Image (cartoon, rainbow, N blue to C red):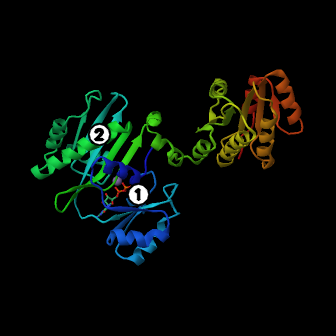
Amino acid sequence: MRLLEFEGKEIFQDFDITVPDSFVLDSEDELPEAVEKLGFPMVMKAQVPVGGRGKAGGIEFVESEEEAREAVGALLGKELKGHRIDSLLLEEQIDIEREMYCSVVGDDEEGAPEIIISSKGGIDIEKIAEETPENIVRTGVDPSKGLKPYQARNLAKELGLEKGLFRSFSDVVFKLYKVFESLDCKLTEINPLVVTKNSGLIAADSKVIIDDHSLFRHPEFKDRKSRHIQNPLEREGEEKGVNYVDLDGSIAVMANGAGLAMALMDLISNEGESPAAFLDTGGGLSEQRMKDSLNILLKKASSDKKVRAILVNIRFMISPPDAMVKGFKEAMKDRSDNDVPVVLVVRGRKSYVEKAMELLGDSEISIFTDVKEGVKAAIEQPERS
Ligand code: GDP
Ligand code: MN
């Protein structure tokens, strides 16, 4: 889960890393309050979970209330790099003497964090690595021992920083490692780490990615997860309480159980096709959840013409099929004739299967009681244009 810049900076503050004075603005009405707090010149930064906002026009420098109002109008509610801008981070403008770089990255191959620092910042680290690799210093950290302050100092020394700077720089490195460690991050990055005119260090940007697998240890972030999910259908899945994974193949798959859905994906792969989506509705399938689930897949199919069919496999075990069928029909109602075909496989308790077939009798979808036949019917569907 990638945090927004202002969320990352809130955490930095908790760990005593200096950030600019700021105000998070969600609506234009809040502007006077922000102006009162920060004054001018001010920086306005679009809060979207992607980098390179500066170049993409997501950062505005304003000198007056009029300019500020204009910038809010130009940014708030608009799209930037595929994300709607729901909030702006307003900050006092800092006087930049120099931009540096500092990050801690989880290195999957080493199974350990790596610290990367550079005396050059403000641009992508990949670019720095390419253009001036001599400006980068990196080192692995033994996660069981953590980072010792002297290690951070040695690292900063390697960059050849002048005395006044290397103390404060190594201090930031040390704190940034603490953030990484405490929040089970995959990445913590400050780019640029700004050296101000009076040689102070300020984190002008933040990038914090928390490992999703550790979210159970950080319930305060778990709640925010859905709005951090970048794929809109995956976000909708999270909000509706179903597990949706967006994929790139031809058959969208859905089942009431993750194992069942995975088995369907295997069967599809065995036939040389690939799944376009995975959706696990979870157990205890209600009318609403059935409807929400099928709706997500119908949306997927309407936005991705590579999807040739939706394959649904429902196994009836404990609850009678009435609610599920109702939800299914409800979702199918708004479908038009040239929409994606839906193939349904019903299995499980015999009386429930029969009841489901009976209830679905008047709908014009293909229903099977054999999974392989259902898979075959799905992959035989023609390409859509
Ligand atoms: P990104 O483009 O999404 O990575 O956004 P950043 O927060 O890194 O901002 C991009 C660039 O804008 C920085 O590298 C700075 O050069 C500049 N910038 C950001 N905040 C300030 C500020 O307060 N004062 C000044 N002078 N420049 C800033
Ligand atoms: Mn940046």
Q: Which residue is the site of mark 1? A: 53
Please tell me whether mark 2 sits on a helix, a strand or a loop.
helix
Q: Is residue 57 above or below residue 132?
A: below
Would you call the spot at circle 1 few (<14 residues within 10 Å), some (14-19), or many (20 or more)? some
Q: Is residue 139 above or below residue 30?
A: above
Question: In the image, residue 144 lies at what x, y percent?
Answer: 29, 27
Would you call the spot at circle 2 few (<14 residues within 10 Å), some (14-19), or many (20 or more)? some
Residue behind label 1 places its C-beta within 8 angstroms of ligand 1: yes
For residue 51, say whether it is visible: no
Residue located 76% across and 38% down the image: 342
Residue located 77% across and 41% down the image: 327
Q: Nearer the viewer, mark 2 or mark 1?
A: 2
Look at label 2 and name its amino acid: Lys
Q: Distance of mark 2 from mark 1, alpha carbons?
A: 27 Å
Residue 35 position by quadrant:
bottom left
Residue located 68% across and 30% down the image: 283
Question: In the image, residue 228 lies at what x, y percent?
Answer: 50, 47
Q: Mark 2 and 1 residues: CB-CB less than 8 Å, in contact?
A: no
Disc nearer the start of the sequence (2/1): 1
* Label total for image: 2
Question: In the image, residue 371 lies at what x, y percent?
Answer: 74, 24
Q: Which residue is the site of mark 2? A: 178
Please tell me whether mark 1 sits on a helix, a strand or a loop.
helix
Q: Is residue 341 left or right of residue 276?
A: right
Look at label 1 and name its amino acid: Arg
Q: Nearer the viewer, residue 37 or 9?
A: 37
Question: In the image, residue 338 lies at what x, y percent?
Answer: 78, 47
Residue located 24% across and 38% down the image: 138
Q: Is residue 206 left or right of residue 75?
A: left
Q: Nearer the viewer, residue 58 or 219?
A: 219
Q: Is residue 164 above or below residue 251?
A: below
